[in-house]
Each structure stands twice: as C-alpha cells, then as structure tokens.
Image (cartoon, grey):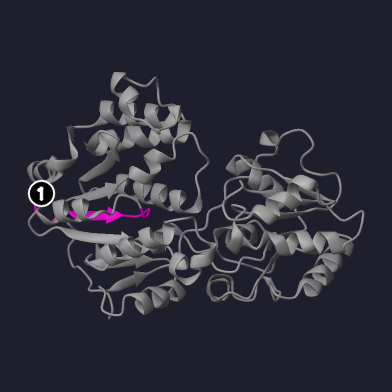
Amino acid sequence: MSPTTRREGPPARLIDITRLASRAGRTLTGVDRVERAYLVELLGQPTPLFALARTALGYLLLDRAGAEGFLRRLDAGDWAPPDMLSRLARGKTPAQRAAEAALRRLSIARVRRGRLARMLGNRLPPGTAYLNLGHTNLTARVVAAVRTVPGARIAVFIHDTIPLDLPQMQREGSVDRFAGLLARAGEADVILTSSAAVAADIRRHLPEGPPIAHAPLGVAPAAPDPAALPKGLPPARPYFVALGTIEPRKNIGLLLDTWEALGEDPPPLLLCGSRGWKNRAVFARLDAGVPGVRECPGLSDGAVSALVADARALLFPSLAEGFGLPPAEAAALGTPVVCGDLAICREVLGDVPVYVDVSDSYAWEKTIRQLSEQPFPAPAPGFTPPDWADHFKVVSSVT
C-alpha cells in the first residue's frame, strides 16, 4: 500500500513530547533528536500546534507558546526548581522532576489519566493530527483518547524493528513492549519511517498494517566545538572514533578484538557512547583495559563532532540499524566511514563507506592498518546529506 496524499493540512497538530521530557538531564539519542527536529519544524509551521506529555501524575497539554517554552528549556538544560508536586514523582531523577514541574507551568490543561479523552475532546479541533515520534506514550489509553476527537488522524514513527529482529540483544521486557507498540501502530492512519529498508521490515511484521511513508532523516551534524573537549582530547596522534551506546548490536567487541590484534601500540580508539545493556563481557574487557581504547561518554554534540571531524575514520561495525545517523553525520563532516554491509548504509550512503564484513576481524585489522599508515587522513568521497526539508515534505503530505 502506498500512503494516501492529503490535499489539505489538518486544522491542528498534536505532537507527543513525553520522550523528550523524560530525557531531561541526559544527552539526546538519535531518536530524541528526531523528535526534537519534528518539534522545531511544527513550531515553524502556521498550523496550530499542541503538545502532549504524560507525567507521573497524569497528562499535560501545551499550546504553541508552551511548546516553544519547553524547547527553549530543553536546549538550555534549564528546568528551574521542582515544584511541590514533584515530590510525588517517585523513580524520577531530579532533572526529570524539574522538567515535569516546568511542563506543568507551561501547560494549558492537566488531567489525571482517566480524563485524557475529555481533555483532548474539549481542547482539540476536529480533524487534529496526532504525531507520536519516539516509541513512547503510544498506549491503548492515548490511542483511544485521540480517536474520540472527531476525524482525528494518528501518525506513528517507527524507527526500526530491531527488537523483533534481534530479540536476544534487547533489554529484559523490551521485546514484548515493542511488539505491543507495533501492534498499536497498526491502528494508526499512517506509519512514518526513515528508509525503504525499514519500511520493508515493518511490512514484514505488519502485513495488513496502515500505509507506510518513508523519507530519509535530515543529516545535520553539530558544528565541531574543540573547546568543549576535555583535557587530553583529541589525541596527539591519528585516531579512530566509534559512536553510539555500547550495547550488543553495536558490535564493539569486534573493535576490541581488532585493537588487541594491532599489537601493543595501536592507534587510539575513542568510544563515544555510554554503556548500555547485555554486554558484560565487553564491559569487563574495557575495565581490564584494551591497549589504545578509551571510553568517552557524555560528550556534547559539538565535542563529538570535533572528534569525528579530525578522525582517520568513523568505525561502525553495527549488526543492525534503523537509519545509522553516526556514519551519515561523519560522511557529512568529510570523515571516512568503515562499516558493515547493511542495507540501510547502502541506501543512505551508497559507495561512500568502506564496507567490511563484520564477521571478518582480520579484514577490519587490515583496513585499520591501511588507514593508520596513510600520511594524511583520506577525506570521505563526496556525500550530499539528505535534509529535513525534503523529509517534512513527505510528512506534511500524509499527516
């Protein structure tokens, strides 16, 4: 099925910002950055905009002014002090409690969970388009509440189907949660995604699902900010970077094998990402120390861009990806990319990367040696990154 094109836009849009609010105090992930990009885009459009957030105490509804205030606080990391109600938000970090307090101040309506449908029905015009972009808050309650708004449409962004395709590499309980999310996405009017490869994966799991619209994400790496780097970075000698959460499908163990094979004085390898889950063996090796390997978690986007821009190459031995922002952003910065032969990398990057079999550690070792021995970093072949404007043309036509 192909997406049905809407000739006229909706009278209003409702964007779910629950995931972004939950990220208060943390570095934004790729999914978070997509949700933020949508918020920025919708704030720039004339269509009336509302934002929905689920908190520990219920639901909050923001208008355009509230959504703008939320974005400013998100970007500045300035949430102001928590309020009295924040004490009731058990299990939340101080930053998350402060963010929820800020959202309450910015909201135009708030309700307990059982009254969500009434709030949306009273506040949203018929035909409102609801967009859920972050795999968060797409619950049966939310779907049913949105459907009580006459003529409402639901668009859900599915970033990948990796939890179902590689269940052995997921957090405890995440496979069942994702299966439930995908089933609810099957009740939407349209599913959004970032590539033909993921669209095919979604259709494989939802053969009778709604139309699927796909468009590449905008690739706009942060401006390199060397001043944001901590002492000792970048290394004084040619180095390599791997970017992403250290979790099983990122296949960091292959890089550790490679670095051990390179001998006692290998080039530096910077792992720019936090530790994730189900990777005890890799964590143990990192704790014991692998020559040349350094973990660099928690860096700002500008600091990461500075490291990637001057690296010999970005290394990306991932076993599965929804879009693969790190190699696309590295290529946009002119940095060579070495990655596994994934369909999504072929779709987004074409012949730009050096493709190396992720089951062949010797081939990775050979490639790293060749890149290390070059007198000057070899720039990535010409790459014109996709932009958000083209992405949102597709989104606007189907939501």
Residues shaded magenta:
126-135
Q: Is residue 264 left or right of residue 97?
A: right
| Vertical order, 317 against 80 (above or below) | below
Residue 129 in the magenta stretch? The answer is yes
The picture places residue 195, in percent across and down from the top left corner, at 44, 71
Q: Quadrant of the N terminus?
A: bottom left
Residue 1 in the magenta stretch? The answer is no
| Vertical order, 385 against 86 (above or below) | below
Q: Is residue 25 visible?
A: yes
Q: Is residue 359 left or right of residue 20?
A: right
Q: Nearer the viewer, residue 350 or 267?
A: 267
Q: Residue at x 42, y 56 (%)?
A: 173
Q: Residue at x 56, y 52 (%)?
A: 277
Q: Where on the picture, by quarter, is residue 84?
A: top left
Marks counted in the figure total 1
> How many other residues sit within 10 Å of disc 1, few (<14), some (14-19) or many (≥20)?
some
Q: Nearer the viewer, residue 374 or 105?
A: 105
Q: Where on the picture, by quarter, is residue 4?
A: bottom left
Q: Secondary structure at mark 1?
A: loop
Q: Main structural element of the magenta stretch: helix, strand or loop?
A: loop
The picture places residue 306, in percent across and down from the top left corner, at 68, 45
Q: Quadrant of the C terminus?
A: bottom left
The picture places residue 130, in percent across and down from the top left corner, at 23, 54
Badge 1 amino acid:
Pro
| Vertical order, 204 against 312 (above or below) | below
The picture places residue 94, in percent across and down from the top left corner, at 44, 27
| Vertical order, 262 against 230 (above or below) | below
Find disc 1 in the rendering and name its residue.
125
Q: Is residue 394 visible?
A: no
